[in-house]
Image: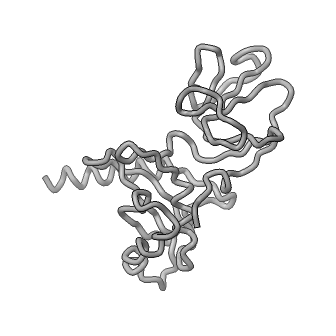
Amino acid sequence: FQFDPNRDLAPVGKIGDAARLRIIGEDGNDVAPGETGEIYFLPNDGPGSTYHYLGAEPKRRPDGWESLGDIGRLDAEGYLYLGDRLADMILRGGANIYPAEVEAAVSAHPDVRSCVVVGLPDSEFGQRVHAILELDETIDAQAIADGMSDFLADRLSRYKHPESFESVRIATRDDSGKVRRTLLRDERAAFREALVYETM
């Protein structure tokens, strides 16, 4: 089994006639249909002409195209598929790791109800992959963590395997399947920083 990053993106439809949409890769150029990149919009009447962002500042290119950091792709018919947010991407030792890819692999485990993956600070690699697992209370969380590397061996490249695990009894996602990854990440990073400070 090899994860296809395009396979798990959620379709959201086509863009309307009032604006245009581009998918731009890391090199700053448009990607081909079916390839994943950062989503940029531009209304026909120019930036800010038909909208105002609340709670976020868009990233604007010199040509006026704007992005809020969402990752996605367009298919050959112009349908948009949404994936991770750029801010949620884990950068480990120079390699980009999409949390959704790791979550899909870990969630395939029969004893894992749900999984959320975040990047936590790491002194050697910049970030490390941390998995928050929703498990039934009868499940031995340590046994799941100990056996996860073997379970993922044929499902995920080794450098993408979670390096730490956390078991929770509450739902990791809301009823619509969404998760506030940034909040979960920041809470755990702050706790880890306090713990390191206290033990120094």
Point out the residue furthest to the bottom here.
138
User: Residue at horizontal 44%, vertical 62%?
Assistant: 131
Q: Position of residue 61 (x, y in %)?
A: 59, 19
Seen in the picture, residue 172 relative to 189 is either above or below; the reply is below
Image quarter in which the N terminus is found = bottom right
- Report the number of discs: 0
Q: Position of residue 21 (x, y in %)?
A: 73, 29
User: Residue at horizontal 57%, vertical 35%?
Assistant: 69
- Name the foreground residue: 123 vs 172: 123
User: Residue at horizontal 58%, vertical 60%?
Assistant: 3
Q: Position of residue 144 (x, y in %)?
A: 43, 77
| In the image: residue 160, left or right of residue 193 | right
Seen in the picture, residue 72 relative to 166 is either above or below; the reply is above
Q: Position of residue 95 (x, y in %)?
A: 42, 46
Seen in the picture, residue 38 relative to 58 is either above or below; the reply is below
Render colour scheme: one colour
Q: Quadrant of residue 177?
A: bottom right
- Name the foreground residue: 55 vs 63: 63
| In the image: residue 66, left or right of residue 81 | left
Point out the residue furthest to the left here.
200
